[in-house]
Amino acid sequence: MYFEKGVLFFQVAGIVSLMIAAYLYSRNREDDNIDENE
């Protein structure tokens, strides 16, 4: 039971970390584009 919960936790943590990384990456790209336009 604990093992299954541990695996599920790592799966959720991995998905959340990927979403955060993608969000920060896209936001940084937008900031760079704004700087280039200026």
Image (spheres, grey):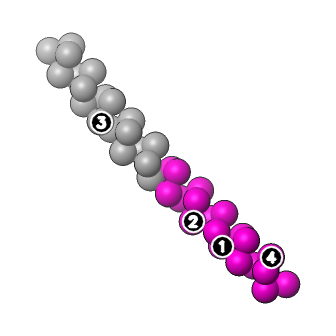
Residue beneath the point at 31% across and 29% down: 9
Distance in Å between CA atoms under marks 1 and 4: 9 Å
Where residue 26 appears, as percent x and y from the top left, is 57, 65
Sequence-wise, the earlier of marks 1 and 4 is 1
Sequence-wise, the earlier of marks 4 and 2 is 2
Q: Quick one: which residue is furthest to the top in this view?
A: 2
User: Foreground residue, 2 or 37?
Assistant: 37
Q: Is residue 4 left or right of residue 10?
A: left
Residue identified by numbered label 3: 11
The reply to whether discs 1 and 2 touch (Cβ–Cβ < 8 Å) is yes
Tag 3, which secondary structure?
helix
Give, as a three-letter code, the residue at label 1: Glu
Q: Residue flagged by tag 4: what amino acid is it?
A: Asp
Q: Earlier in the sequence, mark 1 or mark 3?
A: 3
Instruction: Determine contact: label 1, label 4, CB under 8 Å.
Output: no
Q: Which residue is mark 2?
A: 26
Residue 30 marker = 1
Q: CA distance from mark 4 to mark 2?
A: 14 Å
In the picture, measured across the screen, residue 34 lies left or right of residue 12, that is right
The crowd level at tag 3 (other Cα within 10 Å; few <14, some 14-19, many 20+) is few
| Residue 16 on the magenta segment | no
Under circle 4, the secondary element is: helix
Q: Which residue is mark 4?
A: 35
Which numbered disc flags the more N-terminal residue, 4 or 3? 3
How crowded pointer 4 is (Cα within 10 Å; few <14, some 14-19, many 20+) is rated as: few
